[in-house]
Image (spheres, coloured by chain):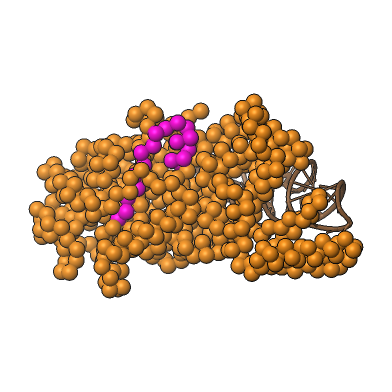
Amino acid sequence: MTLKLHNTKSGQLETFVPLEPGRATLYACGPTVYDNAHVGHARASAAFDILVRHLKASGYEVNYARNYTDVDDKIIKRAREKNQDWQALAQTYIDSFREDMAAINCLEPTHTPRATEYIQGMIEDIQEIIRRGFAYAVEGDVYFDVPAWRDYGQLSRREMEEQEAGARVAVDERKKSPADFALWKAAKPEEPSWPSPWGPGRPGWHIECSTMSSRLLGPEFDIHGGGQDLIFPHHENELAQSGALGRPMARIWAHNGFVRLNNEKMSKSLGNFFTVKDVLSKFDGETLRYLLVSKHYRGPLDFSDEALREAEKALERIYRALEGAEALMGEEGCLAFNMDLVKEFREKFTEALDDDLNTAKALGVVFDVVRSLNRAVTAGNQCETVAYFAGLKIMGDELGLWQRPPEEFFAAQGVLKSVDLKAEDIERMIVARTQARAAKNWAEADRIRDELADKGVILEDKAGATTWKYSA
RNA sequence: GGCGGCAUAGCCAAGUGGUAAGGCGACGGUCUGCAAAACCGUUAUUCGGCGGUUCAAAUCCGCCUGCCGCCUCCA
């Protein structure tokens, strides 16, 4: 089977046919680095990370670029508020973003260009757009001439005449048309600027992506991604600029849905957001990733502590299965032969991801494997255990989940839940409980178990020994 | 006003023509001193509402209702 992706431009599911066989080129719009990443950014990153992992697993060599907008009104404004150098501020949040994405196990893209590294290229592109008659300069600013570009609106499929132009934003008198947008902005006093044919200034937001994607991936590439809020105007404008330069840009435009909080879009402007760091103070990064992956990337995702707790429970079930299998592992000789056992599961799993990255459906297959694995372990069947264990890990790798040793996952729960008992305290209480049990003092045994449970430690009486773990 | 999305069990969530995946929870069983975990079984005759097409619809068409988003910076 082959990958099918939803293309915003056509509004349809399309078979992924790369420009170059065996290679996939992707560009995703990254953050403007003036603040910490919130859960919405995490969702976009996770969605395209799954795409990259799936392409790689399908045998593609992937060239993935994701930019940082490191000069922009908001960065300048925030730097002023904090009385800080704007470049230092941008660097701080680039570091923060990378840290957060690593926490949710997103692979670092092949290229992470910064807008400020491509200013010269942007100036060249703007000059060419003007030369071709699709932009004009006014008092140090340069605007893209939207009415001149007949295809404008083809991505978001909207007629400009039907839009409420200027409904919420004052129309700039100097623009020929209210829809025209800035390619270059003349610098105001005290603002960072670069010399240009139109005087000192800085690039507009949209031109960055047109310039950087063409330099890193070429005039045409396979997939361009971002959140649905970027469809218009950002991606429409990118497409217009690139089109005016004779560059077709992406064949497939993929957009992820929003994260919602109390039924509203989580966004900086509404102020109703949780940063990734907020979430990481209470939940494991892997738990957040599981939540993001548990629903199809294009639909809305309702964010809540309850949703995170459910994600935690689901992950716990998987890690418990992996942990239970450990005692039976080590029969390498069984591996090759018995992989036939998981063949069908793996095919279904791949089919699910091929179907516009249906991670929710893929997780359904994962839990079928979990059940099979638990059965094999209970039956003491080493060869089956090895096969299902391997299958589970392979699927997890493609989703960027459950790759850690189970002990590490459970230990992390103890830290996150602030369990104030040290391992030796717990062991001591277990010894006391074992003695009580030996004396058939069930009341005392149960009291100890309840006390531990209250503090977040779960006891399990296995044959011959009692084990414990922090509960998720 | 234009464009787009969503509506499936107590909760989360798959499912684009063939008779409702999966997770959480709940209930019953096996195991256990009792539990926990695991396994087995039960938990939507029904998919926002009303019509229509069809042998057959959650899935296609029409109308309606509710919610969300874009048209300004936003993943």
Magenta run includes residue A94 = no
Give the drawing colour for chain A: orange
Q: Which chain is brown?
A: B
Instruction: Identify the residue at image location x=70%, y=43%.
Output: A327
Q: As displayed, is residue A427 above or below residue A252?
A: below
Magenta run includes residue A68 = yes
Instruction: Identify the residue at image location x=30%, y=73%.
Output: A81
Q: Nearer the viewer, residue B64 or A388?
A: A388
* Residue A197 location (% of width, % of height): 9, 53
Instruction: Identify the residue at image location x=64%, y=58%.
Output: A472
Q: Is residue A334 visible?
A: yes
Instruction: Identify the residue at image location x=48%, y=38%.
Output: A54
* Residue A193 location (% of width, % of height): 17, 61
Looking at the rendering, the stretch of residues picked out in magenta corresponds to: A51-69
Residue A369 position by quadrant: top right
Left or right: A193 as drawn, with respect to A338: left
* Residue A181 location (% of width, % of height): 22, 54
Q: Nearer the viewer, residue A314 or A413?
A: A413
Q: Nearer the viewer, residue A426 or A393?
A: A426
